[in-house]
Amino acid sequence: MGMTVEFEGFRRELTAHCYRMVGSVDEAEDLVQETYLRAWKGVDGFRGEASLRVWLYRIATNVCLTALKGRGRRAVPSGLGAASEDPYGEPVIAEDALWVQPVPDELVMDPASIVADRESLKLALIASLQYLPARQRAVLILREVLAFSAQETAEMLETSVTAVKSMLQRARATLEKVEPAKLAEPTEPDQKRLLDQYIAAFETSDLSILERVLRKDASLEMIGSTTWFAGNDTCLPYLATVLGNPGDWRMTPIHANGQPAVKTYYQGEPFGVALLTFAGNGIKSITVFGDPTLVDRFP
């Protein structure tokens, strides 16, 4: 009973770790279950040379590495090609692509360290991590997100400290090329105002509100499609085609990936989840996950 309680105390952070590794909340939960199964089977061999936390992270990391073998990276549309210049064309559906998934804050964030967790779970970072080879990804997460020592990381991955340092340098160099520049976020009250206006725009079918709150360099991505838009010249005309009539859309504020978000209903039916990134005094990006099954995942 005691070990069960101790294991459960690590579930949230292990789910966050597996999510950073694989980019899918569904798979992350399965991998944590596999981690606990292996831990239970090997508990007699746990002699306490390392802490229980280090031991569980070693198992979880290697479970993730096994799952990632031979697999392509999860992506968002902007990672698969150039932005579309035609806001009136049909989105190009990519049924076989592996997509990054959003994650509910409550599933992966410890209320005591939510500020620290938030940055390491932002959707843009999760998408950027997927560019890294699996072992480099593991090293970067273990060293820079979780602050394990080089020695602990080397032992988890059954390699040398020198190899860990080399992988970390290569991972950092890759991230510098693919991770988007960070812009100053507005204050919490301003974020709430922007979120409220975004919701009002859809629920009242008022494009003028979106014209006020979207930055000129805003981007719009629709997971499931390789089509995405960069800049208001294409974002706004596309949004005009989907606003519909007043009352068609209903939205409920949520938090996902440490970001403001909404779960959405269209004409009374679940539609999906949209994550918003704010910068300066406006909305910098909208990422839409048009998957009705996601709605029930978010409280």
Image (spheres, rainbow, N blue to C red):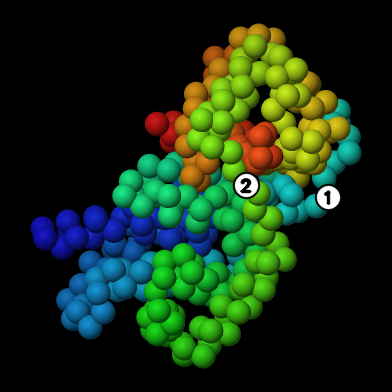
Q: Quadrant of residue 195?
A: top right
> Which tag is nearer the camera, tag 2 or tag 1?
2
Counting from the top left corner in percent of width and height, residue 130 is at 61, 61
Secondary structure under tag 2 reads loop
Classify 152 as above or below 285.
Answer: below
Classify 62 as above or below 196.
Answer: below
Q: Residue at x 23, y 67 (%)?
A: 40
Q: Say whether residue 45 is left or right of residue 119.
A: left
191 or 159, nearer to the observer = 191
Counting from the top left corner in percent of width and height, residue 51 is at 25, 74
The total of numbered circles placed on residues is 2
Counting from the top left corner in percent of width and height, residue 19 is at 47, 56
Q: Residue at x 60, y 79 (%)?
A: 169
Counting from the top left corner in percent of width and height, residue 200 is at 61, 17
Q: Residue furthest left?
A: 1
71 or 99, nearer to the observer = 99
Residue identifier under label 2? 184
Q: Residue at x 44, y 60 (%)?
A: 18
Q: CA distance from mark 2 to mark 1?
A: 25 Å
First along the sequence among labels 2 and 1: 1
Q: Residue at x 83, y 50 (%)?
A: 82
Q: Amino acid at mark 2?
A: Ala
User: From where the camera sits, is residue 179 visible?
Assistant: yes
Residue identifier under label 1? 82
Q: Residue furthest top?
A: 246
Q: Say whether residue 72 is left or right of residue 260.
A: right
Q: Quadrant of residue 137?
A: bottom right
Classify the position of the N terminus by image quarter. Answer: bottom left
Q: Amino acid at mark 1?
A: Ala
Q: Is the residue marked by circle 1 packed among few (<14), some (14-19), or many (20+) residues within 10 Å?
A: few
278 or 72, nearer to the observer = 278
Classify 3 as above or below 47.
Answer: above
